[in-house]
Amino acid sequence: MNDQEILKYVDHTLLKPYATWPEIHKLCEEAIEYRTASVCIPPCFVKRVKDAYPENLTICTVIGFPLGYQTTEVKLAEALQAMKDGAAELDMVINLGDAKSGQFEKITDEIRQMKQLAGSLIVKVIVETCFLSAEEKIALCKCVTEAGADYIKTSTGFGTAGAVLEDIVLFKAHIGPNVKIKASGGIKTKDDMKKFLEAGCSRLGTSSAIQS
């Protein structure tokens, strides 16, 4: 797998809290040049990017980011605004407190509402694996599958650790056939990217794809 083949799986990402428009603009230019799957950017930049690049650029943004403990109503309102602004993909963070409390039906319902709102747009569910036990990860695979989301995603990049290959193997064993996997957090080199793709990922979230 050559570099260009790898890049078509990458959500070219810039989510640092102090991101500026010149940095976002550069990210978009790189995404177009290298034909990445999307740009993943903060919600506040979505409309400006859509206005600047009405074609040839898929915009992904984050919902309930990075901690996930907003109410469902707030997450849905955030998603609706992002969609109106031009986002085509939504990466939502689950409520980790609900996961740690075993309230998986509540998590499933929130994901289902998000997917119903998004319709044909892609919804990726961030479960933040670094805070979860294996049993909780398996339960969340079921939540994502039953709710009809498009992807389960490992990490925000703001937790104590990012993606690890063992979690990709676990996800593959427990998600439904219509759910794909996105790995993110700590993926820095082309070798890293290749390993995660070979393990079963369909998307990679990284800010290092072009430079590595």
Image: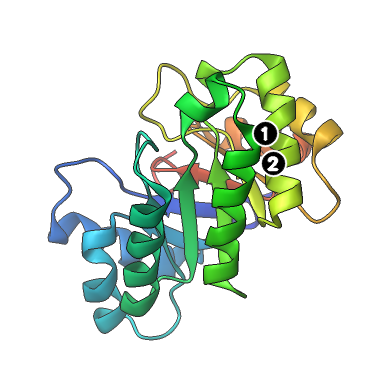
Which residue does the numbered mark 2 point to in the structure image? 143
Residue type beneath disc 2? Cys
Residue 174 seen in this snapshot = yes
The colour scheme of the drawn protein is rainbow
Q: In the rendered image, is residue 8 in sight?
A: no
| Figure quadrant of residue 15 | top left
Residue type, label 1: Leu
x and y percentages locating residue 17 in the rendered image: 19, 41
Q: Is residue 60 left or right of residue 25?
A: right
Crowding around mark 1 (Cα neighbors within 10 Å: few <14, some 14 to 19, many 20+) is: many
Label 2: few (<14), some or many (≥20) within 10 Å? many
Query: Looking at the image, is 109 positioned above or below residue 161?
Result: below
**Residue at (34%, 63%) from the top-left corner?**
77
Q: Position of residue 66 (x, y in %)?
A: 35, 37
- Disc 2 from disc 1: Cα separation: 5 Å
Left of 168 or right of it: where is 161? left
| Total numbered labels placed on residues in the image | 2
Occupied quadrant, residue 112 = bottom right
Q: Which residue is mark 1?
A: 140
Q: In the displayed structure, does residue 88 sit left or right of residue 148?
A: left
Camera-side residue of 208 and 152: 152
Please tell me in which quadrant of the rendered image residue 44 appears: bottom left
* Above or below 90: residue 154: above
Q: Position of residue 183 (x, y in %)?
A: 59, 38
Q: Is 51 rendered above or below residue 167?
A: below
Q: Residue at x 46, y 18 (%)?
A: 161
Q: At x 35% / y 78%, what residue is drawn?
A: 84
Judged from the image, the secondary structure of the residue bearing numbered disc 2 is: helix
Q: Is residue 74 above or below residue 87?
A: above
**Is there CB contact under 8 Å for labels 2 and 1?**
yes
132 with respect to 143 (left or right)? left
Mark 1: which secondary structure?
helix
